Image: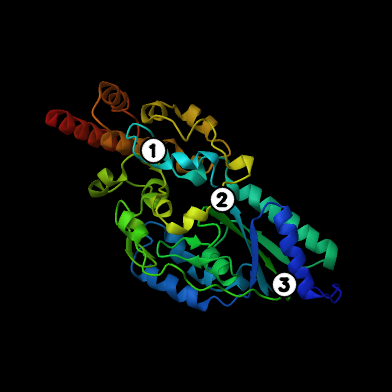
């Protein structure tokens, strides 16, 4: 802690921080120490299995995840926050998945990108703390550095990591974002919760690609979120049919989780769907030029995959859709796309359409 800070009632300050956090739009706040050895051991095992696929940064920055001091010197505590993101259209999730001509986009990506907004609010929280204690050391993170955010949140008492590897909360399910404020203040820590998944394996059974290979073990190489977002190369042929109409991420494991019956709809306008992305048809989105794609994904997490992978993903979904003249025409319009990656997936989709039409 900075020497210019005066002694404080740290317990009261921790309570104040939680009060200020709620006023800033965070639904829950917890505090933990920086001992993450158990979580790091789990990470190392996951990496040794090769489950990270092409995400080389997971291996490269593993040491940083293990030692918070390497991200912020002098850190003593981590303030962990969560913010609900489920939009009003959440009730239509199952209908969207059962409409093969409709594009399904993970609910977290329908609105504005959460990273900047949450980080700004964490900065505001830090300023409020500063007004109370004077200058102190801190650094805010929202999926912006190699932080074991789910392990931190679990240790801070915000929930427990479920068998699908997402954080679960008894009163809020899992439809929320996480953020952290590293600080050198000696705040009292919260008590972690026990795990409450019991014998339930619904998330493992529902996974379209069977990516949850064991409780608490996800093989990213089979995960639809990885395949449609993180993977830069071709989607493995044997997995394409399993993607269905999912073109950006996958929510199936959250959708069936019993704890999500307690999930709350987000009050944040930023997280509400933009450009009708919760109800768009595949052919509509496949027709977007790169300019249209960039314009309609400005400020969105979707933009990070770029137009080429956007088309790659939609081509697979069109290959999985019922055979129709409209679908065939849309695919043929992209058959000579400059990108070999797009052409390959369009050719596969056309072959699937042809097979489907010959069977009917």
Image point (40%, 65%), residue name? 163
Where 120 falls versus 180 (above or below)?
Answer: above
Image point (39%, 52%), residue name? 226
Q: CA distance from mark 3 to mark 1?
A: 48 Å
Q: Is residue 16 left or right of residue 51?
A: right
Mark 3 / mark 2, whichever is N-terminal: 3
| Mark 3 in CB contact with mark 1 (< 8 angstroms) | no
Q: Is residue 134 visible?
A: no
**SS for callout 1:** helix
The 10 Å Cα crowd at callout 3, few under 14, some 14 to 19, many 20 or more, is some
Mark 3 / mark 1, whichever is N-terminal: 1
Image point (57%, 44%), residue name? 113
- Tell me the tag on residue 264: 2
Q: Position of residue 92 (x, y in %)?
A: 44, 39
Mark 1 / mark 2, whichever is N-terminal: 1
The 10 Å Cα crowd at callout 2, few under 14, some 14 to 19, many 20 or more, is some
- Tell me the tag on residue 184: 3
Q: Position of residue 338 (x, y in %)?
A: 35, 31
Would you name the residue on which mark 1 appears? 95
Q: CA distance from mark 1 to mark 2?
A: 19 Å
């Amino acid at each position: 802690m900075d020497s210019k800070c005066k002694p404080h009632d740290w317990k009261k300050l921790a309570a104040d921080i939680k009060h200020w956090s709620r006023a800033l739009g965070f639904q829950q706040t917890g505090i933990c120490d920086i001992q993450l050895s158990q979580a790091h051991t789990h990470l190392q095992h996951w990496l040794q299995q090769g489950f990270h696929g092409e995400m080389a940064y997971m291996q490269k920055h593993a040491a940083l995840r293990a030692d918070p001091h390497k991200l912020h010197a002098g850190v003593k505590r981590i303030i962990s926050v969560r913010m609900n993101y489920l939009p009003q259209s959440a009730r239509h999730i199952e209908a969207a998945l059962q409409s093969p001509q409709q594009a399904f986009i993970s609910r977290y990506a329908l609105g504005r990108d959460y990273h900047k907004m949450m980080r700004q609010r964490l900065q505001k929280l830090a300023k409020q703390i500063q007004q109370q204690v004077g200058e102190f050391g801190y650094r805010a993170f929202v999926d912006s550095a190699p932080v074991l955010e789910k392990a931190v949140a679990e240790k801070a008492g915000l929930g427990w990591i479920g068998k699908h590897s997402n954080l679960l909360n008894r009163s809020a399910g899992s439809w929320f974002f996480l953020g952290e404020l590293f600080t050198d203040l000696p705040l009292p820590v919260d008590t972690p919760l026990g795990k409450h998944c019991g014998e339930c394996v619904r998330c493992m059974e529902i996974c379209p690609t069977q990516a949850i290979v064991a409780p608490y073990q996800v093989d990213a190489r089979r995960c639809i979120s990885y395949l449609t977002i993180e993977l830069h190369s071709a989607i493995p042929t044997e997995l394409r049919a399993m993607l269905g109409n999912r073109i950006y991420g996958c929510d199936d494991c959250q959708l069936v989780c019993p704890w999500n019956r307690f999930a709350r709809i987000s009050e944040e306008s930023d997280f509400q769907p933009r450009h009708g992305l919760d109800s768009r048809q595949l052919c509509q989105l496949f027709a977007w030029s790169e300019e249209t794609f960039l314009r309609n994904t400005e400020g969105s997490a979707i933009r990070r995959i770029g137009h080429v992978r956007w088309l790659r993903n939609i081509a697979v979904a069109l290959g999985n859709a019922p055979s129709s003249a409209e679908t065939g025409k849309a695919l043929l319009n992209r058959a000579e796309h400059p990108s070999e990656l797009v052409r390959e997936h369009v050719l596969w989709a056309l072959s699937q359409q042809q097979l489907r039409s010959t069977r009917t």
